Image (spheres, rainbow, N blue to C red):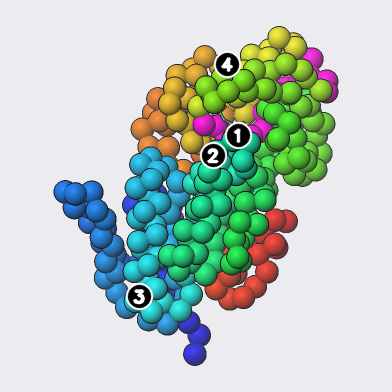
Amino acid sequence: MRRELKIFSGSSHPELAKAICEYNEIPLGASEIIKFSNENIMVRLLENVRGSDVFVVQTSCPPVNEGIMEMLIMIDALRYASAERITAVIPYFPYARSDKKDKPRISITARLMADLLQTAGAHRVLTMDLHSPQIQGFFHVPIDQLIAAPLICDYFRNKDLSNAVLVAGDVGESKSIGRYANRLNLPIAIIDKRRDGDDEKARAVHLIGEVQGKDALIIDDEIASGGTLLEAAQFLKRYGVKSVSAAAVHPVLSGRAVERLHQIELDELVVTNTIPLGGKQSQYDKFKVLSVAPLLGDAIMRIHNGDSVSKLFR
Ligand code: R5P
């Protein structure tokens, strides 16, 4: 007998979970999440999951640490309720930037996240555009990483790109920008960005490539404090670009990010809904938000049916 597919949502991004369910034409799993006055969390599944193939959608957004606990508790509840297979669907992976020991006496917290998910009972993980792909190696269970490049490129294909150049805001992004350059058949430029500490102050020091008189399209995996984007845009203006637009997969938009966006003369800022924008969308009118719900929905169906997920990379 085929296992029944069920999708449950944590409280981080219920709109995305509902959109995935609508796309796959299945109802969202019923659950309740209670937070007690002592801040303990209780998750109760309100339907039978015995023997089911269950997907739990929880992204990383404020309150980040509470969202992690909630996801772990939900996975544990599913395990004790005899779900046959549990997949954690994490559109934006928590602590993804803590992926290495680049200072003495610090934690590799992204690996700790992997340990916690597996200990809670996750049999698989489905995520998107990891800050660094080696995070996949922190897991001993299968992990599928989707990429938003096809979705973002489809959007830009409908624009005039005859004078465009893709710009990597830092050397780290220079590898992933190839996904965009190949799909859009565009030249690239790379900014040599340095950070002097953990103060969110990015400093552009060199530029590799031709940008003068061009329409620059900055590509990044995420916009967190907005420091990298602000510095890159200002740097490109000094090099005589005609216009600047930007695209980033994960709109983290922490701290003073929206304030920083207002300091940049961007033509357009394309992001996806891996993280809810909430009120920030009304504070900045240049956001164009692309939905990853169909992509995640397709991946969930493929995992459920045992089909190839790499087909989705087109
Ligand atoms: C850096 O390695 C990433 O690709 C992003 O550029 C960075 O995470 C963005 O952070 P922020 O917006 O805080 O500068």
Residue 218 % position (x, y): 67, 28
Mark 2 belongs to which amino acid? Ile
Tag 3 or tag 4, which sits nearer the N-term?
A: 3
The answer to whether the residue labelled 3 contacts the one labelled 2, judged by CB atoms less than 8 Å apart, is no
Query: Pointer 1: what residue?
Result: 103
Residue 33 % position (x, y): 26, 58
Kindly report the distance in space between the C-alpha atoms of the residues bearing marks 4 and 2: 38 Å
Against 177, is 29 above or below?
below
Left or right: 190 as drawn, with respect to 302: right
Mark 4 belongs to which amino acid? Glu
The answer to whether mark 3 is within 8 Å of ligand 1 is no
Against 92, is 45 above or below?
below
Q: In this orientation, which residue lies closer to the viewer: 12 or 183?
A: 12
Tag 1 or tag 4, which sits nearer the N-term?
A: 1
Q: Quick one: SS at disc 3?
A: helix
**Quadrant field for ligand 1:** top right
Q: Quadrant of the C terminus?
A: bottom right
Residue at the extreme front = 105
Q: What segment is highlighted magenta in the picture?
A: 209-224
Mark 1 belongs to which amino acid? Lys
Query: Pointer 3: what residue?
Result: 80
Q: Quick one: SS at disc 4?
A: loop
Against 188, is 13 above or below?
below
Tag 2 or tag 4, which sits nearer the N-term?
A: 2
Residue 156 found in image quarter: top right
Kindly report the distance in space between the C-alpha atoms of the residues bearing marks 3 and 1: 39 Å
The answer to whether the residue labelled 4 contacts the one labelled 3, judged by CB atoms less than 8 Å apart, is no
Is residue 57 at all visible to an observer of this figure? yes
